[in-house]
Amino acid sequence: MTDVILHIYDVTNSGSDKTNNTILQINKIFKDGIGLGGIFHSAVQVYGDDEWSFGFCEQGTGVFSCPSGKNPMYTYRESLILGKTNFSIFKVNQILRELSREWPGSSYDLLARNCNHFCDEFCERLGVLKLPGWVNRFANAGDTAMEVAGNTALRLRQAKTEIVSASKVAYRFLLGVTNNVKTDLGSPSNSNREGGSPRFQATWLKNIITNGAKPSTSSEVMNQNGVVPQPPI
């Protein structure tokens, strides 16, 4: 049985002192000031002096290790003990080999599959607490924003489809009206039929365009696409 320690860093590897200082200020305000979270890198230490984390690379695994609390790419912030694992060092090494295969560097995604997501899964397999919510809250918020944006795009596509459909109906109708008018010029009796009246058909066309051009409601999108749009944050 041994401690599982989470090491947390401020992400200050942008290459710009101005940007790095801005990130430090964001973390100071949102984490230290109001406890919401910030922009952090994390790594897990279990057995030995090294910490394990995940990052981007074009080939091979994205899982890597370095001396605990000494990752040169970031600014060290703090460490948290997440509990004790009952697994032996041999079992932990097996888990790390499995994770190395499952987490290739090319699969890295800033919002959906970053170092904090990796540490979450590592801790879950070790049987200890997962990361505190504030460590990865900005990425989770970004992920939610992406989902909302996707649902908004779905609604816009639906509205566009309805408008195009209404336009096609209108075009076919107007073409029919033109043909009817040409036919009716020499046939007075035909002009008295309600279905063939240009005035009646113009009113019907107006209703089609007015109703057909409205974007679908949330319930309509859900019924047609099986997706329930989420309200904006």
Image: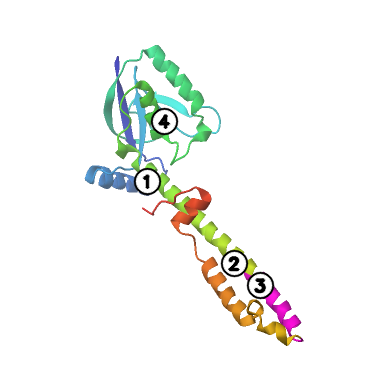
Residue 180, visible in the rendered structure: yes
Residue 129: image x %, image y %? 30, 27
Residue that protrudes farthest toward the left in the picture: 33
Q: Which residue is mark 2?
A: 166
Q: Which residues are magenta?
A: 170-186
Residue 47: image x %, image y %? 34, 17
**Label 4 to label 2: alpha-carbon separation:** 49 Å
| Sooner in the amino-acid sequence: mark 2 or mark 1 | 1
- Foreground residue among 86 and 13: 86
Please, what is the three-letter code of the amino acid marked with disc 1? Ala
Q: Is residue 219 left or right of residue 175?
A: left
Q: Which residue is mark 3?
A: 173
2 or 3: mark nearer the eye: 3
| Sooner in the amino-acid sequence: mark 3 or mark 1 | 1
- Answer few, some or many: residues within 10 Å of disc 1's Cα (few below 14, many 20 plus, some between 14 and 19): few
Q: Which residue is mark 4?
A: 118
Please, what is the three-letter code of the amino acid marked with disc 3? Phe
**Magenta span includes 181:** yes
**Magenta span includes 111:** no
Q: Which mark is residue 141?
A: 1
